[in-house]
Amino acid sequence: MLKNQNMESIKKGRVFIKTYGCQMNFYDSGLIEDGLLKKGFNNASSLDDADIVILNTCSVRDHADHKIVSEIGRLKGDKKIVLTGCFAKQIKLKREKGIDIHNAGIPIDYCFAPDEILSIPDILANDFEKNYNGDISNRRHKTTTATKDDYQNFNLVEEYFYNKNVNNSFATIKIIEGCNNFCSYCIVPFVRGKERSIPFSIIYNSAKRYADKGVRELLLLGQNVNSYLSPDDDKKDFSYMLESLAKIDGIKKIKFLTSHPKDFNDKLIELICKNDKISKGIHLPVQSGSDKILSAMNRGYTRRDYLNLVEKLRKGYPDAAFSTDIIVGFPTETEEDFNMTLSLIDEVGFDFLFGFKYSPRPFTKAFEIKDDVPLEKKKERLEAVFEKQKKIFNSILNSLKGKRVNATILAVDKEKNSIEFEKGILFKGCGLNDRMIYIVNNNKDIYKNLRIGDERQVEITYVKNNRLYGEVLK
Ligand code: SAH
Ligand code: SF4
Ligand code: F3S
């Protein structure tokens, strides 16, 4: 079992981080990896090759929990298993509350909540230095707690931003952690804690650094970016942040995720509509089109409020593109409620949506209500949502045929089996509210001169399989 050979490289172990869930988790995994590499750990090339496996988990739906439990069951050999992320916090909370859980016995060595991730490198490094004896199976079931809220440790966050290598023109910055909204179905406020904004100066300086390293596009992340407020200055809100970042030399596009409709104020609408650098592809989760269900979900807006918001944004910027999240089968959802959701999808005309079957989550308010929509019904409704969305998106795309737009060339398409690829190089361009355009010029000379990052005028020529195709004009 002891891997005597190559002792140096396994002294602190080879680590493999597997990430589940949303972009917040992927971002966090970057922070963890950065810290571990600094402490002398190495990256393992695969799960099988790892001495330490870190599972950065999600817990948003029941299915997410099951995926992780079965992943742990599949792990072979004597590996240290470090659980972190939202499912890890769920386990901790249940243990604290003395709740009996079906997965309490899963063999993990460490369990860190999302707000403890910055401690992971230190704790693992200490333990490995003190205890490492080649046997990594002797501490099963032990969990370690870091009690402080690491996200207040802004120095480490700042250092991460500053040192992070960026190897393309795109970078993600988390601006706010946690959520105070307590939508009645959602476990996130319980597992990720209360809202904590990262100081404006850290984000601003990091964005500047990124821009100097060649970053052109920023994605600002948070469960509810609209409620961003710098902890050291209450005038520095989300609008202030967007406006300031847009002024940085080199930054060409700023996207953000996720917005909450109840916190989307007029100042922000005006700014988005007038500032060319701010993305007009807006993700605005609606969840349901029925006022009864929206109220039971504790979303804080009505159907009319939501539609008014979309209208205002479209008035300021007619080509704005919207995407959303929908939950079907929330307790007490009738056929009539559901039809309100379908009609809202029609009214708004989303570019894309994420649809989910309601899944009862521990600690939440809705957990107390009977999950009374049968699974078959949920499946049927979700299918109907996707069916409608497909048709709508197709008609949105078809309405764009013949349009000429400015597109930035982003990448050479790697889909080697596409017909267009066989004809030559297929470029991916991005224009018209960040909709992807596949560029299939017949004129090979234009191809030859095309470079990633170029901005070109593209004419949308046809639509196939829900994709826009276009030709570079010159
Ligand atoms: N902060 C974001 C995203 C939260 S999680 C927001 O407010 O929109 C992403 C999506 O998962 C949610 O928008 C919701 O549609 C879905 N979701 C959350 N809890 C769920 C549950 N218990 N059952 C089904 N879907 C859920
Ligand atoms: Fe969950 Fe609602 Fe917070 Fe989004 S806003 S993370 S859905 S509680
Ligand atoms: Fe999942 Fe946690 Fe994100 S529950 S969706 S990883 S905030």
Image: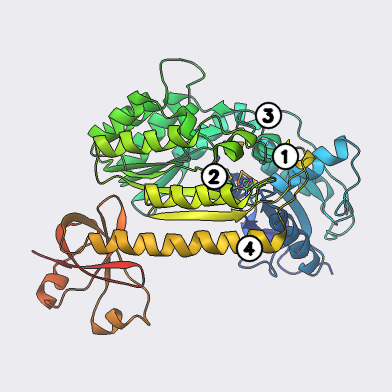
Instruction: Name the kind of residue labelled 1 in the image.
Output: Ala
SS type, badge 2: loop
- In the image, residue 81 sits, relative to residue 423, either above or below, namely above
Q: Which residue is mark 4?
A: 379
- Marks 2 & 1, CB-CB < 8 Å contact: no
Residue 99 is at least partly visible in this image? yes
Alpha carbons under labels 3 and 1: distance apart: 28 Å
Q: Is residue 412 left or right of residue 440?
A: right
Q: Which mark is residue 366?
A: 1
Q: Nearer the viewer, mark 3 or mark 4?
A: 4
Q: Residue at x 26, y 64 (%)?
A: 398
Q: Which residue is mark 2?
A: 288
Q: Quadrant of residue 243?
A: top left
Asked if the beta carbon under badge 2 is closer than 8 A to the nearest atom of ligand 1, the reply is: no
Q: Nearer the viewer, mark 2 or mark 3?
A: 2
Instruction: Name the kind of residue labelled 3 in the image.
Output: Asp
Name the image quarter holding the C terminus.
Answer: bottom left
